Image: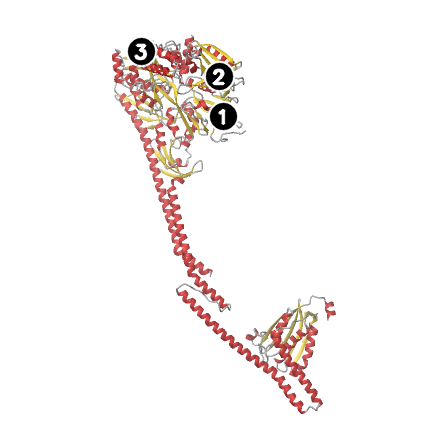
């Protein structure tokens, strides 16, 4: 049952609405600055689901954070050192960080928080944490984590939220904003005045939920919100002509793809899977489904990772080669209707972008004699089928993360999150070498082998990393860190013209 | 002087400025009118072109669906083939969100949708031929404009179902966005019901999101009033109070309206700039004209003013004034002639004065001879006679009286001459005019009797007290009475009267003599002027001077053959009667 629950969590985290980072913006009350942010929620889910995911990014922080190129950076921890054997990590905590209840973020509190995480099912998503065998607190602001084996994934997973339990409410975080009130369609957050990186410029953040991305866009056009959390791909062009808003784009660390159920015999032959990869025109798909705002994906690894080899030969759109591979695998066109050499079904949750992708994939597959029938499902039904393994393939998006640790969760044969049954000893070996690498050279070599093995033995057809664009009213000046989501620096945003948006009651 | 300048300015305005202003006004009007027509025509073309593009866009999509329908109609395709055709169609033509095939009973046969179809055959809309209908445009929940096209299919002449496609009209937005007239001119599209469905101005896009309805917009109303016959134009104030130039073209058969709006200031910017340039040029030309006219006019009028000044000066007696005209034209000749004339006038004046002096000297000499010769002759005769009758005591007394009298006469003549040269000062004491006049009248009664003249006096019953000099006034009255007796024939009458006239005391001396000619009355008080055949003519001049020294006035009235009256007026003394009486 644990595996089932973890699978459900995986699915949840792999969905865009579940995984949206936080957003921001709106207007204010009583001489304060308020940001109002509009964001869409996933069809079939609670309207606040997406907001709550975003809210967490502003309420909670980890000891470390992962930069877009995959390097860990200090957050609640000021810094760290590791013993020569790699089994003991010493973290120096900030002495000016506080929980929202005013208590200090000291080593005792951090240890307690990490131990709660270690004892929760969510630890299955954190391969770097499962190797922890002990946590010591030698000093009030010093923490020592002991591992059973060397693991570079530890820092990747120390992005996990540090929190304190609250007897009468949700856990208490350390982030720049605190949840103040919640309605069925809105969440209001207030600035945390003791935030260690300075008091946030905006006093309040109001999150508003909309049924679709375009609905939130319409709201922005009406001047009802200050930030559009997600600019719909087809609205990007119109947004470009808007002088009143500024757009900020970044590559989302989620990969869209068709993942095969490796328990189905039809997918056991890697030649078939490679053939399917060659059959898809990724560029055309990005142009139609993402309006050109995305990059092709060939493996589930983060393309901007510092150790990624960008010179590897990727899958090209080559129907002839795909057909040849199919023939080589012994798959011939039958006489059924429609005639095909291979048939399978693919499920996906209701979403117009995925439906458009489904049609394109279906057309591309049909050109090599593969008949795929897509089935659009409400999210709950989709999750149920997915958890039960009741599918041939799944069209969805999977979190790739910015580190190597996240793909490990889904594709290492020993991982309980590897629910599709993908097993490849060379891939496992690459993951293990990544985990135990002691320097950048070893990491680069292991990462390259991982990419090569997953290209040679693909668990699915990875289609694209989509670009996400956020739009912010020019009334606000946004702090931009190249490659980063601007929401991460929302506490530093300020009014472009001080006082222009201040209300005084 | 001003009238000449005014006339000259009017002449300049009529000859130079007015035509220039009229030319400028006509040019500006023509320029603006031509520009306005050109701008409106250009914008109308834009609106018409956009309307055509949108119409073509809609028609193309309808044609695409017809083509897809043609692939399905009477082809006996299997269901999976129909399904694949529809799915491929929506991929090849992204404007189509969905295409679904229904059978004659309305059951779904095939669809481009993976999930459940959401589009149905439109119940109303714009017909595109006999079997095709386009639904009214609407904005969906995703804020996108969309329309549904339905095609009735047939098989062997019988209805075999329908093909329905949902078209996203986003491309229409792009078309409208691409239209920009100048910097601030944009296109917009209004649906048949007035709904704003596209706006090219980024700042105005929220109006589309708000679902603004423009059915009351003046331009939209004008299009409807014209029954969509063709492009119309109108200038109107926008919601923000900006004057706009709008043109609109109907988009048939959809019933939409394509409008192109541009701020009037920008639309007519070229005309405004040319107008400003024209105004500046005309203004400059006017300035040059006025400046040249001013300086030319000044050089033209200045000799006239100089001549006027010279004439006025000479006329005022400044005979030495001359005009100075430097121009080398007729005005120069005129100025020279004027100066020559003035020179001649000086000569003539000097000549006249010389003659006047000679005449006056003669008259004075004659008067002196007359006034002095008689007493001198009397003295001489008396001296000759006294030598012979020196022993006669009676004669010696007569001689003494005669010598005294003639010496007094000589002395009086000499006093008059001295008074003319340097008037004797007068003293002021309260003086009863009645008494003063009575004393003089009595002293001269003997002379009047000798002349056969009746001398009468009439005195005021009121007190007539003045501040005066009794001796000087006595001389005045004596002069006037003497003149009156001398001017009156024997048997005539001389009357002296006093009267009170308000704050003045009036003393008059009247005679019934021959009178004084009117032409001589004006100069009668001048020195050396007399109506008598003998004498220096100083009496009345001295009289007038004394009267005026006492703050009085003297006037004369005369009628030939009836007599003459001299009337004097003196201020009544300010001191009370008692004081005056005591002083008297």
Give whichever of B157, B268 is nearer the camera.
B268
Above or below residue A179? Residue B227 is: below
At numbered mark 2, what does the secondary structure look like: helix, strand or loop?
Answer: strand
x, y percent for residue B121 = 34, 23
Residue at label 1?
A202
Q: Residue B542 sits in which quadrant?
A: bottom right
Q: Do labels 3 and 1 share a chain?
A: yes
Q: Mark 2 lies on which chain?
A: A
Above or below residue B343? Residue A133 is: above
x, y percent for residue A310 = 33, 20
Q: Kindly identify the residue that appears in the image at 49 percent across and 31 percent down.
A: A500
x, y percent for residue B254 = 34, 30
- Tag 1 near tag 2, CB within 8 Å: no
**Taking B462 as reference, is A66 left or right?**
left
- Crowding near pointer 2: few (<14 within 10 Å), some, many (20+)? many
Question: Which quadrant, please, contains the C terminus of chain A?
Answer: top right
Q: Which mark is first along the chain, 1 or 3? A: 1
Residue at label 2?
A92
Task: Measure how far apart labels 2 and 3 are at the Cα level.
Answer: 49 Å
Q: Nearer the viewer, mark 1 or mark 2?
A: 2
Q: Mark 1 lies on which chain?
A: A
Q: Residue A9 sits in which quadrant?
A: top left
Q: Which mark is first along the chain, 3 or 2? A: 2
- Crowding near pointer 3: few (<14 within 10 Å), some, many (20+)? some
Residue at label 3?
A267
Q: Kindly identify the residue that appears in the image at 68 percent across and 91 percent down.
A: B389
x, y percent for residue A482 = 41, 24
Question: Which quadrant, please, contains the N terminus of chain A?
Answer: top left
């Amino acid at each position: 049952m644990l595996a089932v629950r973890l699978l459900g969590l995986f699915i949840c985290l792999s969905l865009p609405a579940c995984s949206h980072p936080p957003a921001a913006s709106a207007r204010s009350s009583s001489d304060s600055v308020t940001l109002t942010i509009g964001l869409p929620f996933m069809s079939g889910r609670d309207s606040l689901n997406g907001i709550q995911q975003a809210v967490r990014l502003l309420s909670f922080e980890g000891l470390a954070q992962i930069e877009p190129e995959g390097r860990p950076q200090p957050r609640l921890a000021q810094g760290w050192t590791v013993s020569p054997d790699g089994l003991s990590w010493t973290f120096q905590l900030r002495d000016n960080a506080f929980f929202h209840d005013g208590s200090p973020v000291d080593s005792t509190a951090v240890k307690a928080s990490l131990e709660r995480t270690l004892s929760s099912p969510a630890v299955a998503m954190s391969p770097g944490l499962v190797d922890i065998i002990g946590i010591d607190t030698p000093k009030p602001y010093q923490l020592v984590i002991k591992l059973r084996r060397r693991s570079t994934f530890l820092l990747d997973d120390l992005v996990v939220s540090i929190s304190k339990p609250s007897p009468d409410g949700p856990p208490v975080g350390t982030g720049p904003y605190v949840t103040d009130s919640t309605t069925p369609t809105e969440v209001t957050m207030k600035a945390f005045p003791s935030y260690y990186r300075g008091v946030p410029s905006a006093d309040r953040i109001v999150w508003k939920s909309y049924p679709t991305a375009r609905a939130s866009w319409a709201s922005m056009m009406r001047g009802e919100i200050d930030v559009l959390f997600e600019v719909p791909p087809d609205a990007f062009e119109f947004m470009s002509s808007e002088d009143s808003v500024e757009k900020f784009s970044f590559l989302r660390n989620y990969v869209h793809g068709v993942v095969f159920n490796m328990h189905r015999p039809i997918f056991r032959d890697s030649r078939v899977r490679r053939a399917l990869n060659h059959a898809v025109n990724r560029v055309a798909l990005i142009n139609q489904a993402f309006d050109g705002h995305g990059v092709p994906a060939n493996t589930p690894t983060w393309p901007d990772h510092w150790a990624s080899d960008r010179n590897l030969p990727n899958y090209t759109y080559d129907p002839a080669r795909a057909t040849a591979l199919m023939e080589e695998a012994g798959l011939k066109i039958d006489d059924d209707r429609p005639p095909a050499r291979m048939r399978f079904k693919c499920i996906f949750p209701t979403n117009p972008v995925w439906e458009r992708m489904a049609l394109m994939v279906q057309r591309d597959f049909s050109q090599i004699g593969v008949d795929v029938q897509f089935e659009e499902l409400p999210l709950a039904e989709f999750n149920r089928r997915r958890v039960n393994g009741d599918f041939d393939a799944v069209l969805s998006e999977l979190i790739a993360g910015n580190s190597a640790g996240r793909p490990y969760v889904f594709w290492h044969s020993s991982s309980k999150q590897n629910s599709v049954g993908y097993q490849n000893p060379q891939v496992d070996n690459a993951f293990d070498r990544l985990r135990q690498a002691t320097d950048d050279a070893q990491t680069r070599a292991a990462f390259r082998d991982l990419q090569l093995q997953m290209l040679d033995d693909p668990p699915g057809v990875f289609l694209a990393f989509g670009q996400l664009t956020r739009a912010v009213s020019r009334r606000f000046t946004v702090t931009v860190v190249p490659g980063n989501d601007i929401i991460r620096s929302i506490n530093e945003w300020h009014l472009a013209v001080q006082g222009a948006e201040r209300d005084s009651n | 002087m001003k009238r000449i300048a005014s006339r000259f300015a009017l002449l300049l305005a009529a000859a130079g400025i007015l035509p220039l202003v009229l030319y400028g006004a006509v040019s500006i009007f023509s320029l603006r009118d031509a520009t306005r027509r050109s701008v409106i025509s250009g914008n109308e073309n834009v609106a018409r072109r956009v309307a055509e593009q949108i119409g073509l866009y809609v028609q193309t999509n309808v044609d695409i669906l017809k083509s897809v329908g043609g692939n399905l109609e009477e082809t006996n395709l299997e269901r999976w083939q129909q399904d694949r055709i529809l799915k491929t169609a929506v991929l090849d033509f992204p404007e189509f969100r969905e295409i679904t095939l229904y059978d004659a009973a309305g059951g779904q046969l095939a669809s481009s949708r993976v999930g459940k179809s959401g589009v149905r055959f439109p119940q109303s809309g714009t017909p595109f031929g006999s079997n095709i209908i386009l639904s009214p445009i609407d904005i969906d929940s995703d804020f996108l404009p969309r329309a549904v096209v339905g095609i009735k299919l047939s098989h062997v002449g019988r209805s075999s179902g329908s093909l329905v496609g949902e078209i996203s009209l986003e491309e229409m937005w792009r078309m409208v966005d691409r239209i920009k007239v100048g910097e601030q001119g944009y296109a917009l599209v209004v649906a048949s019901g007035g709904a704003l469905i596209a706006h090219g101005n980024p700042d105005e896009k929220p109006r589309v999101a708000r679902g603004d309805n423009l059915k009351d917009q003046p331009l939209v109303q004008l299009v409807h009033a014209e029954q969509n016959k063709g492009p119309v134009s109108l200038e109107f104030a926008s919601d923000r109070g900006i004057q706009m130039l709008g043109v609109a073209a109907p988009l048939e058969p959809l019933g939409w309206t394509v409008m192109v709006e541009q701020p009037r200031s920008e639309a007519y910017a070229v005309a405004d700039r040319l107008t400003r340039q024209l105004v500046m040029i005309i203004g400059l030309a006017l300035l040059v004209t006025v400046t040249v006219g001013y300086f030319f006019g000044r050089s033209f009028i200045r000799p006239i003013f100089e001549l006027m000044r010279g004439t006025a000066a000479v006329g005022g007696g400044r005979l030495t004034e001359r005009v100075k005209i430097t121009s080398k034209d007729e005005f120069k000749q005129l100025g020279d002639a004027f100066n020559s004339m003035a020179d001649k006038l000086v000569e003539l004046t000097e000549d006249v004065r010389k003659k006047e002096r000679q005449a006056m000297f003669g008259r004075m000499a004659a008067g002196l001879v007359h006034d002095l010769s008689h007493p001198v002759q009397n003295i001489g005769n008396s001296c000759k006679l006294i030598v012979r009758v020196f022993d006669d005591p009676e004669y010696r007394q007569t001689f003494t009286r005669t010598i005294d009298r003639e010496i007094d006469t000589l002395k009086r003549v000499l006093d008059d001459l001295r008074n003319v040269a340097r008037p004797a000062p007068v003293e002021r004491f309260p003086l009863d005019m009645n008494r003063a006049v009575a004393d003089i009248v009595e002293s001269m009664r003997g002379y009047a009797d000798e002349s056969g003249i009746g001398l009468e006096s009439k005195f005021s019953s009121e007190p007539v007290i003045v501040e005066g000099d009794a001796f000087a006034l006595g001389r005045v009255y004596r002069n006037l009475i003497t003149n009156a007796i001398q001017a009156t024939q024997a048997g005539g009458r001389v009357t002296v009267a006093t009267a009170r006239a308000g704050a003045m005391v009036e003393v008059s001396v009247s005679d019934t003599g021959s009178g004084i000619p009117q032409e001589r009355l004006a100069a009668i008080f001048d020195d050396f002027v007399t109506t008598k055949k003998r004498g220096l003519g100083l009496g009345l001049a001295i009289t007038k001077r004394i009267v005026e020294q006492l703050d009085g006035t003297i006037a004369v009235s005369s009628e030939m053959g009836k007599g003459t009256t001299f009337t004097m007026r003196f201020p009544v003394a300010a001191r009370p009667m008692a004081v005056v009486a005591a002083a008297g």
